[in-house]
Image: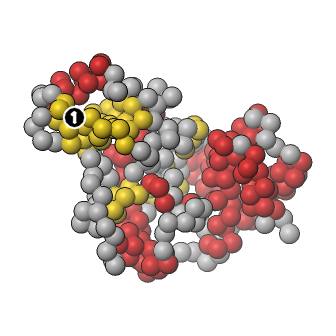
């Protein structure tokens, strides 16, 4: 059941009462409900986050993607420390052009660029803090930003969580010395990334348009977004072909893919434990032979 204080705040905002509420699945980090208002509107409600600022960060991420004006995200209706109220987007069926359309729209999102890497605030990748506020050097160097704010942060967290063995430790020492060489040739302007683009973080609406949800936005290298799509599947060749037609990738993308996967695998190691350790070691050592 939704807390009374939350119901009151939503009813004050809506200028009418909630007539129905229904718990829906899919929220591993927050509780999720569909709520129906007496005036006929249906909204999507997230509650019970363990992080007091998480809903504000998610709302800011959705608003940042919305500014690009190219791919649908749920509209933020109301946000508070204890809840996030979003437009409810009914899911439809993917038509034959869904993934072509999706690939093209992601390429358009990546056309939104800035001169500096990072973002105005830190946010979350799952329930782990994601560091986005760069130093002066990191703001201008993707290699420094990515190594320090992504890989090294997760590695040190894994050490703190006592999840680092000698294979990962020794590999990481070598990786630190090779990071510039690994990322060489991929220099581009910082562009807007969804940040956590796996198969569970998009929907298909009733018009078969892609919809992005649950972002972990920052301005970085677009190869990082594309690599994440490979981690658990859920994207087709049609998607990648359409993306590349619209926005060709720099030479050597395939080689760099593992370095971007490593961030998310280390995060999963920290979130879910040692079942991800072997995969983290393999990704690190793929660059050391």
Could you tell me which residue is drawn at 26 percent across and 45 percent down? 87
Q: Which residue lies furthest to the top in this view?
A: 5
Could you tell me which residue is drawn at 27 percent across and 35 percent down? 21
Could you tell me which residue is drawn at 63 percent across and 59 percent down? 260
Marker count (numbered): 1
Question: Considering only vertical position in the picture, is 244 above or below 46?
Answer: below
**Does the rendering let one see residue 77?**
no
Q: Is residue 221 left or right of residue 95?
A: right
Q: Where is residue 153 in the image (x, y as percent from the top left)?
A: 68, 41
Q: What colour-coding does the image apply?
A: secondary structure
Dot 1: within a 10 Å radius of its alpha carbon, few (fewer than 14), some, or many (20 or more) residues?
few
Question: Considering only vertical position in the picture, is 80 above or below 132?
Answer: above
- What residue is disc 1 on? 20
Check the picture and name the quadrant holding the C terminus. Answer: bottom right
Query: Could you say which quadrant of the image residue 42 lies in?
Result: top left
Name the one closer to the observer, 212 or 57: 212
Q: Is residue 195 left or right of residue 22?
A: right
**Does the rendering let one see residue 31?**
yes
Q: Where is residue 26 in the image (x, y as percent from the top left)?
A: 44, 46
Q: Where is residue 129 in the image (x, y as percent from the top left)?
A: 57, 37
Check the picture and name the quadrant holding the N terminus. Answer: top left
Local SS, label 1: strand
Question: Considering only vertical position in the picture, is 12 above or below 191?
Answer: above
Could you tell me which residue is drawn at 50 percent across and 38 percent down? 29
Q: Position of residue 52 (x, y in %)?
A: 46, 26
């Amino acid at each position: 059941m939704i807390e009374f204080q939350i119901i009151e705040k939503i009813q004050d905002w809506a200028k009418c009462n909630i007539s129905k509420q229904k718990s829906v699945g899919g929220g591993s980090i927050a509780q999720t409900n569909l709520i129906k208002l007496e005036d006929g509107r249906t909204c999507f409600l997230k509650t019970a986050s363990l992080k007091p600022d998480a809903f504000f960060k998610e709302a800011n991420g959705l608003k940042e993607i919305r500014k690009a004006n190219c791919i649908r995200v749920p509209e933020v209706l109301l946000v508070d420390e204890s809840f996030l109220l979003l437009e409810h987007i009914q899911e439809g069926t993917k038509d034959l052009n869904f993934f072509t359309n999706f690939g093209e729209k992601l390429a358009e999102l990546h056309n939104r660029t800035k001169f500096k890497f990072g973002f105005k605030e830190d946010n979350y990748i799952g329930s782990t803090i994601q560091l986005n506020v760069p130093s002066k050097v990191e703001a201008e160097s993707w290699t420094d930003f990515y190594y320090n704010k992504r890989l090294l942060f997760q590695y040190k967290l894994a050490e703190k969580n006592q999840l680092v063995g000698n294979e990962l430790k020794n590999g990481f020492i070598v990786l630190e010395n090779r990071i510039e060489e690994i990322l060489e040739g991929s220099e581009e302007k910082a562009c807007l990334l969804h940040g956590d683009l796996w198969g569970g973080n998009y929907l298909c609406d009733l018009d078969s348009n892609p919809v992005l949800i649950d972002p972990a936005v920052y301005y970085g290298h677009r190869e990082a977004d594309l690599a994440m799509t490979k981690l658990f599947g859920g994207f087709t060749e049609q998607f990648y072909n359409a993306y590349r037609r619209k926005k060709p990738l720099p030479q050597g993308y395939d080689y760099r893919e593992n370095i971007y996967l490593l961030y998310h695998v280390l995060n999963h190691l920290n979130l879910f434990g040692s079942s991800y350790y072997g995969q983290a070691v393999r990704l690190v050592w793929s660059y050391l032979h």
